[in-house]
Image (spheres, grey):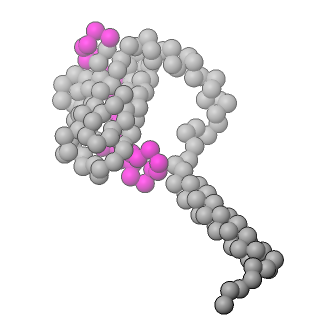
Amino acid sequence: MTRELTGRHVLVITLAAFGVIIAVNLVMAFLAVGSFPGLEVKNSYVASQHFDRDRQAQESLGWTARASYDGARITIEIVDGQGTHPVLRDFTATIGRPTHKRADVTPHFEVAGGGIYRAPLVLEPGVWNIHVQAVAPDGTTFRQRLDHYAGAMVN
């Protein structure tokens, strides 16, 4: 016995298909908003007024940060254009996931020589961002983000 496809059946099929599409979109939107880490700055206009000046001052330092991770300890090294370790007034690094701030940590680094900093740290597998910040003796702020994935540091 075959049933005839009526207009009512087509309407129910169409509404069900669109209902599934709308439900999936709502779930995906909710998950996307829930995983957004938030704003980088409170007022982007004010931050933009200092951006070029700060960038030029940082570039004039000629510094580069490098990081390595051995599974139990993270090492961050800052070198200048000549390959030597500059003297720093202050140093911090925050390690966290790129998608949320729940796992962010700012370990206590010990100086392992000029420009080399080490801290004990255990990271779960996956992608991690390392936000390095240091201050030069003249007060210039140095910032660099290092990306960590599967045991290899990538600039």
Q: In this view, does 147 lie above or below 1?
A: above
61 in relation to 134, above or below: above
Residue 40 image position (x, y, % from top left): 55, 39
Query: Toward the viewer: 148 or 51?
Result: 148
The image shows residue 66, relative to residue 31, as above or below, that is above
Residue 94: x %, y % from top left: 37, 40
Pinpoint residue 42: horizontal percent, then vertical percent: 61, 40
State the extent of the magenta-drawn residues as a range: 81-107
**Which residue is outermost to the top?**
82
Pick whichever, 89 or 85, lies toward us: 85
Position of the C terminus by quadrant: top left
Task: Kindly identify the residue that appears in the image at 33 percent across and 38 percent down.
Answer: 148
Q: Name which residue lies at 78% across and 74% down.
A: 11
Q: In this view, does 151 lie above or below 52?
A: below
Q: Residue at x 71, y 74 (%)?
A: 13
Q: Is residue 133 visible?
A: no
Q: Residue furthest right?
A: 7
- Which residue of the protein is positioned furthest toward the bottom in this rendering? 1
Is residue 123 something one can see in this rendering?
yes
Q: What secondary structure is the magenta-colored segment mainly?
A: loop
Does 93 lie within the magenta span? yes
Residue 85: in magenta span: yes
